[in-house]
Structure formats: C-alpha cells, structure tokens
Image: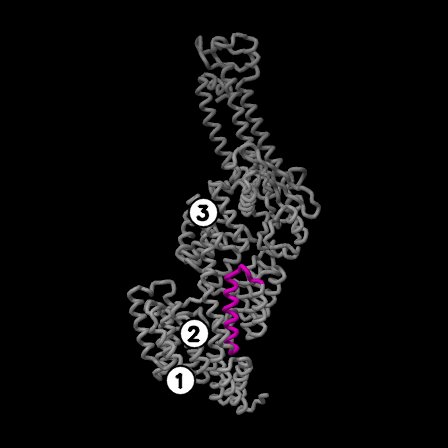
Amino acid sequence: MRLSNFFGEIHRRSVWQVMGSYAVVAWLILQLAETLEGLIGLPLWFGPAIVVVVLLGFPVLLLTTLTQGGFRRTGAQAEFSDRGEGADASLSSWKTLEDRPIRDALSQVFTWRNALVGGVLMASLLVLGSAGYSGLRSAGVGRFGSLLASGVFDSNENLILAEFEDRTSDGTLGETVTALFRIDLSQSTSVHLLDRSKLSPGLVRMQMDPTTHITHDVAMELAQREGVKAVVSGEVLPLGPGAVVSTRLVAAGSGETLVALRETARTVDAVPDAVDRLSAQLRERIGESLRSIQGDPPLGDVTTGSLDALRKYVQAEWALDMGDLATAEGLIDEAIALDSTFAMAYRKLGVILSNQARDSEEARAAFTKAFEGRNRLPDRERLLTEATYHTYVTEDLDAAVAAYEHVLALYPSDGIAGNNLAVLYGERDEMEKAAALYLSAIERDHAPAVSYTNAVFTLFGLGQADSASVILSRFRESYPNHPQVIQYSAALSSAQFEYEEAEGSVRRLMDGLDGNPRMQLWAEAELASYAMVRGRLTEGAERVLRAYGMQDEAGTLFIDFPEPLFEPFGRATVQLHFLDDPEGAVNILDRAMEAPLVSGVPPGEPAWLEVAGLYAKAGRPDRARGLVDAYQAAAETEAASEDDYADRRQADVHFAEAAIAFATGDAEEAVRLYEEGRAMVPKCGFCGLPEWAEALEAASRPDSAVAAYEGYLEFNGLFRSQQDNTRLHRVLLGLGRSYEALGQPDRAGDYYQWLYDLWSEADPPLQARRADLRVKLLALGRAIP
C-alpha cells in the first residue's frame, strides 16, 4: 500500500476511530517499553520519557485529524491529497472555526506526513539518547559516567549507611527511611553495606559505645578509620502533609559529595515510594546494572503497606542490635498485628525464636508464614526465607543449601547466607567445605561475629587447634569487646584441659556481663564444670544449682532436666562417681522418689532413663528396670518415637539397658548395647563413650578399653566441659587400670598423675581418694613430693 493510500485511509476515519486506535497503539508501546526496561535495563528516565512522548502524541493526532477532516462531511468523497495546503472543502468543515486562513495554517503544519515524521523523530531521539546515555555511563565519561566506570569505586565496594536526620515532628521517620534504604541497598550487586556487627568494633576502637547511633559525622570518622571509601547519608524534611527525602553519597577521604539526590513524598504514607526512587537513582549513579535495578520490586510491595508496622520492625531491629531479644520479639509481634501479611517480620520472628532454641513450633509457624508471603520480599530476603523454611520446617537440607548458594551467587559478600550455608555443610558432615566458607568470609572481611565463632568451632572439630587459635586472634582484633571472644578463649582452653587458664577467662568475662543473662548463665555453668573437674565439689554444686535457676531470666533451656529430679540426681551422681558411695547414692534417689513433686514427673520423661542408669550403676538394677519399663510403656502411648529426637531417645533406652546388663554381671551384653546405642547417634561423639569403655574393661578387653577411653580424651569437642565435669576423672582412672592390666605401668602412671594433679585443690571428701592415688603412684615408682 502506498503511503498516500495509508494517509487517505486514516483521513476517512472519524476522530473517535483514529484516537481510539492511537490509544491502543500507545498502550502497546508502553507495555513494550516496560518489558524492555526489565529485559535490557533501559535508563531510569526512559519510562517517564516514553510516557511524555505518548501523551504529546494525543493532541498532535487530534489536531491533525481535525484539520485533515473528520467531524462532518458535506460532499462526496474526493481523492485525498496531502499537499500541505488547505483541505478540500468538500471533505470537511469546522463548525467552530470559520476563519479559513487560520485553518489553512494549521493544515499546513498538522499533516499526516508531519505527524508520522515527528513520531519517528521522537522515537529516534529516545533510542539515540538512551544509547548515548548508556555509553557515557559505561565509559565513565562526564556527568553521566558511573562511579564504578570512572574508577571511583570498585565492584562490591563497602559503604556505610548513616542514620537519616529526621527534621519532621514525627520523630521516627528518619529511622524508618534509614531502614528502607538499607533494605533496598542490600539488594545491590555493586555495593555492600556494612551492618552494625561490622561497625561496632570500629566504634570501640574510637573509644565510643558500640551501641552509638551512626550519625553522618560518626559514619565519616568510621569510614576514614576502617578504610571505607564513602558514606550514604541524608535527611527527611517536612513538606505539608508529606516530606522531602534527600540523600547524598560522600567520599570519606575528601568529604566531597559524589552524588546528591532528593525526592518528594506527597504524604507520609508515600515515603517508601520516594525512597524507592531515590535508592534506584543512587544505585544507577554508582554503576549498578540498570536491568538489576529495574528488576527489583517496589519497596512497598516487598515490605509492608503499613508505615506503623514498618516503624515497629525498625525499632525491633535496633533492639536486636542492642541484644535486647525480649523487646525485639515484642515489637515484631506488634508489627505483625498491624500487618498480618508482613513476611519480613515473620522471618525475623522465626530467626529470634530459633536462635534462642525455644518455641520451636512457634518458630516453624513464623517461618511458614514468611514462606507463604515470600513473593512480597526482595530477592535476597526471599531466598533467605526459602532457606530458613527448608532448614527448620521441611528439614530439606538440599533445598536450603541450594537457596543459600543462590544468594551467594547474587551477593557474594552476604555474611548471613555464607555463615548459614557453612552451618548446613556442617550438618551434612562436610566440615572441610564449611571451614573453607567461614575462612573465605573472614578473609574478605565480610564475616559477622558468628562466622568467627563457627570457624573456631569447626576447625577445632577437624583437629586443627592451632588454626582455631589463629582465627580466635583474628576475632579478637575485629571484635575486641565481644563477649564471645572470651567465651571461646575459655572453651578452647578447657577443651585442651587447661582449666586454670579457662577459669581465669570466664571470671574475667563475668565482670562485664551485666544485662546479659544468657551469657551469665553459660559462665556460671562453665565455672561449675571446672570446679567439678578439679574436685571442688561444693562450689560446683552451688554454681550448677545457681545456673539452673537462671534459665527463666535468660529465656533459654540450657539444662534440660525436670526441676524435682535435678538436685537429687546431681547429689547422687557426686556420691556415686566422686565419693565412690553407691549406697549413699541409692539413698538419695530413694528419698527423692518419695517426694510429692517427683510423682508429678510423667513416666515418659527422658530424664527417667538417666535416673535408671544411675540406679543400675549404684547396684540397683531392679529399680532401674522398673523405670525403663515405665518409660517405654509411656513412649508407646505417646508415640514418642515419632518426635524430632526419636533416635536419641532410643539410644538412651539402649544405654539404660546396657547399665542394667552391666549391673547384673553381663559385661559382653553391656558392650553390645552401648555399641548399638552409639550407632543410633553417630553425630554424638561423647554419648555413651566412657560407659562403653568401662564395659569393655569389665569384659576383660583392656586393649579395646584403652582405645575407647583415649578416644574420649582425643575427641575434638570445643564445648566439652559439660561432659568432663563428671566423666573425666572416671576416664583417667579407667586408663590407669587398663594400662596396668596390659603391663604398662609407665602409661598407667601418666594418667594417675594427671588426676592426682587435677585434684590438688579438691574438697576434703575427695582427699582420701587422692591419697589412694598417691599410694598407687608411689607403687609405680613415681616420686611424689
């Protein structure tokens, strides 16, 4: 079809037909532009520009249609001519415009050919402008050049986000805007925001409180000290019912403003949209892929539509940073009450609960709600939500690993994903991969404190104590005032049986633990274990009872044992295993069994299996049998075998049965039952190990007994003091006896000497047993002062 025929066809149509057709075409153009923005990453101004061009086309097309004919026809259709002259009077006339010269002038300008040429010209300018802008941006040329392209920033550059100054009467809008910026910038693949866990050590080095608010001035000083190139800061100003949000990117070294931007929110509820636009512009100026920026959903879609709920969430995050878990949990609950679809809040609630190892059902419910709303989350949060859901709810570790690996593929410096992925590698017994991931994060200086502690734990478990010590030193340098620096120092010392050094570390730690009940609980229990190992039985008993009583305040179940049984079981254990008084142990247990509160402990309580084992070891297998039978009957009724700890419960039954077999003189049966029980819990290296060694010794298999006893001492368990407190002396005595049976008095003397020295400050009741050790050592030819 010739162009003149095409124009003629348009000319014949009515105004409404032409304008309607243009509206359809305009809609298709806008849809295509939106699709291209997401696919190839057009400039942020391209969308608004195409809207303006399309809107301008409406009046141009309307005037062209009117001047070239369209309201009314007064004669037969004539051949169409688009000569830039007045339209043929036989084709149309305007009721309201009788001035022919004006109409002729308009007809010369608003022709179909001019309309088409103008449209092509505008489209060409948009395409050439976009191409030129993208080229200059990528080349780092002029004011359009990005900071990455011009060499100001490196890829994945560290940035510090200062708290936005709030000049409104609201009082909380500044911290809300700061949180929104953090959420959006955390999706960036070009920069990495340092979180508070990385900033707190720097504040300490500046001799400031690690909980200090990160204002612009504080952020600038931190950036200069820590080698961070730039700071993002800003302010929120009132503007009628809304606000003006401004931000700037400032070079830390020179104080030069690299980027300055501002956006207006017509109402307070429109602030998230303003932040969305500002953050996108900032990421564009930094040099992030335009496709990546435009691929992120709006903040309002991925957080919450309730600004009040968002405020509660922000306040909860601050409480978490301050270590106030109870307040954080309460605020998250309030946020969820304000917006029941707030997926990000549900995920945070699940994390709080799971990290405290309590309310596992509630945590799973929270992770499930977050997972159901994951499409309302940014990519990073969505993937983290999927990972935690598969970790805690479906327990599909492969799916969780895949989700974390996807996060790291998008955000290689993500400390949370890196740490949690390493934890899952450990769960799958891929300890070397876990250690490598922890160390990689530490080397890149993107590791949160938990990655340091997990690295120490994992390396020690791999038998690399020296490497664990090196990482602990790095941890001390990066987080000098972190309480876990001393905690892990103590654990590393005690795991290598250096109790005096470990005790000194914990006592130093306790001096600065005001307001940290969980760490106070751990420290009290740890000192109790050190006291027991070293024979200070009275101190150990007092401290462990004190620790037990601190659990409610700490909000954690550190010692999982029913209260009515805990104290008598502990005293009976001391009587039997330390004072070698089985009759006294039985008497303590018998009196406890008559107490009214003990009768309230259900027979299906796992602690009864430990009581049964103690009865058996004290020479009362009959009492032990009754408790085990009652437990198994209750377990069948309650379908206990289907719970999360079924294997451990079955192993405990085997251990109790083994103790009964041992007490009735069937050492070989005891060995078999201990071996079967240990096979049920392969990840629990300590479980049943000393007792198995004692059964091997009783079965006249000293070689195997030595291997089992020494396996206990050589097991690389970092937090092993809760095992050693009542078992280490039994292992050392067993090794002494077994080596004597093998005719190796020197080796036997080594272990007797170890225990003799360990009990140098033991309580008077143990001094008699220490005197027996002295006699043995003298008989073995050891010189004892």
Q: Residue furthest right?
A: 254
* Label 3: element kind: helix
Identify the residue shown where x is 40% and y is 72%.
679
Identify the residue shown where x is 56% and y is 59%.
449
Q: Using the image as rendered, state which of residue 5 and residue 216 is in the foreground.
A: 216
Tell which circle, 2 or 3, labels the residue nearer the N-terminal end. 3
Q: Distance from label 2 to label 3 (Cα)?
A: 42 Å
Pinpoint residue 261: horizontal percent, then vertical percent.
Answer: 61, 38
For the residue marked with disc 1, what is the amino acid? Ala
Tell which circle, 3 or 1, labels the residue nearer the N-terminal end. 3
Q: Mark 1 points at which residue?
A: 699
Mark drawn on residue 25: none
Q: Mark 3 points at which residue?
A: 334
359 in relation to 315, above or below = below
Q: How packed is label 3: few (under 14 Cα within 10 Å), some, or many (20 or more)?
A: some
Pinpoint residue 106: horizontal percent, then vertical percent.
Answer: 56, 14
Q: Distance from label 3 to label 1 (Cα)?
A: 62 Å
Q: Which residue lies furthest to the front in this view?
A: 596
Q: How packed is label 1: few (under 14 Cα within 10 Å), some, or many (20 or more)?
A: some
Identify the residue shown where x is 47% and y is 48%.
344
472 in relation to 307, above or below = below
Identify the magenta region: 512-535
Q: Using the image as rendered, state which of residue 178 and residue 55 is in the foreground.
A: 178
